[in-house]
Amino acid sequence: MSFRDILVHVDNTPRSMVRLDLATKLAAQQGAHLTALYVVDVPPADMFYGFPSAFFDLQRAEELIARMRASANADSERVAMAFRERIAREGIHGEWRLVEGIAGEIVALHGRYADLVVVGQCDPRAASERQCRPVELPASALLATGRPLLGIPYVGNFTTLGENVLIAWNGSAEAARALNDAMPILERARKVTVLAINPKRGIRGEGELPAADIALHLARHDIKAEAAHTLSGEITEGEALLSYAADIGADLLVCGLYGHSRMREMVFGGVTQSLLHEMTLPVFLAH
C-alpha cells in the first residue's frame, strides 16, 4: 500500500520550502506523483464597489488588482523553480499548478483528486496578512476534501518524517479512520507507538489493556507497534499528546480530527484545538 498522488500547497512564505521539502521526501519514499499548488488569492474588482468615487473608481480598482496579480505571479516563479529542482533531484514525477481564486476553496477542490494533502499551520504572527489565509490549516480543508491532511507546523525543522510515529488512540471512529489512512506511512516506519490518554475501561472504552487491540491489528499488517497509555493529569489531553511525542522523539503524530458540524462550520473538541494551534511536529489528520 502506498500514496500514489500527493498534493502540497505552496506559497511565497519561508515555511513553504519546509512543506515542499517534506512533501518531496514523502513522495520519493512512496513512489508518488507530487503536485505543487500555488494559489494567487487576489480580491475581485467588485470588492471595491461602494467606495466613494473620489477615493476609488472601477478603473483604479482593476489597475490595483492587475498589479497584485502580477506581483503574485512573479513570486510564484521562484517557488516553481524550487519545486522543479527538488523533483528533479529526487527523480520523481511532478506537476506545477498556478491557480487564481480563494485559496482555501482551491486547495480543497484540488485535494479531492489526491491521496494526501500537505498544508501548513498558520503563523499567528502573520495572521493579519492576506497571504496567511490560505494556510489557516487544516480544519476547513480537511472537511472539504474528504482526504487526509499532513499539517506542518509554522516553526521547527524536520529532517525525517514517518520514521518514529505516534498514533493517538481512543477507540473512536475518527481515530480508526486516521490510523487506516496513515497505513502507507506506518508500513515504512522504524518505530510505531499507539498511545491512549486517560483511557476508559470496558466496551465503550479501550478495554482492559488500552491500545493493545489496535496494536494487534497493526501486527497483522506486519507493523510492530508498542501499546502505551498515560494520564494527562493537570494538563489537557492535547498537551499530554504533544508532550509524549516529544519524550519519545516522534517525527509524526497520527490523529483523528474530532468535532461536529454546526451551520456549515466545524466545532472542534479540546484535543483537536490543541493540535491545530500548538502542533510541534508534523501531524497526520483524518476525519
Image (cartoon, helix red, strand yellow):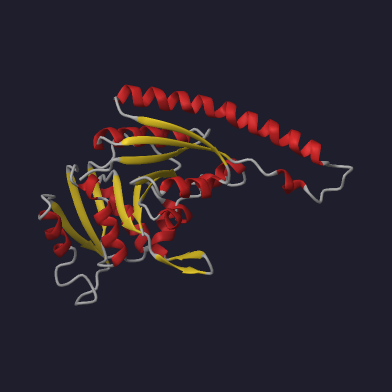
Camera-nearest residue between 142 and 269: 142
Q: Relative to residue 114, is residue 175 depicted above or below?
A: below
Q: Relative to residue 160, is residue 111 depicted above or below?
A: below
Q: Position of residue 149 (x, y in %)?
A: 37, 49
Left or right of 218 in this view: 100: right
Residue 60 appearing in the image: yes
Quadrant position of the N terminus in the picture? top left
Quadrant position of the C terminus in the picture? bottom left
Q: Position of residue 85 (x, y in %)?
A: 39, 22
Q: Position of residue 82 (x, y in %)?
A: 44, 25
Left or right of 28 in this view: 111: right
Camera-nearest residue between 3 and 276: 3
Residue 121 appearing in the image: no
Residue that lies at the very extreme toward the front in this rendered image: 113
Left or right of 35 in this view: 12: right
Q: Relative to residue 30, is residue 216 depicted above or below?
A: below
Could you tell me which residue is drawn at 42 percent across and 47 percent down? 111
Q: Position of residue 208 (x, y in %)?
A: 14, 72
Q: Relative to residue 118, is residue 229 depicted above or below?
A: below
Camera-nearest residue between 35 and 148: 35
Could you tell me which residue is drawn at 37 percent across and 31 percent down? 94
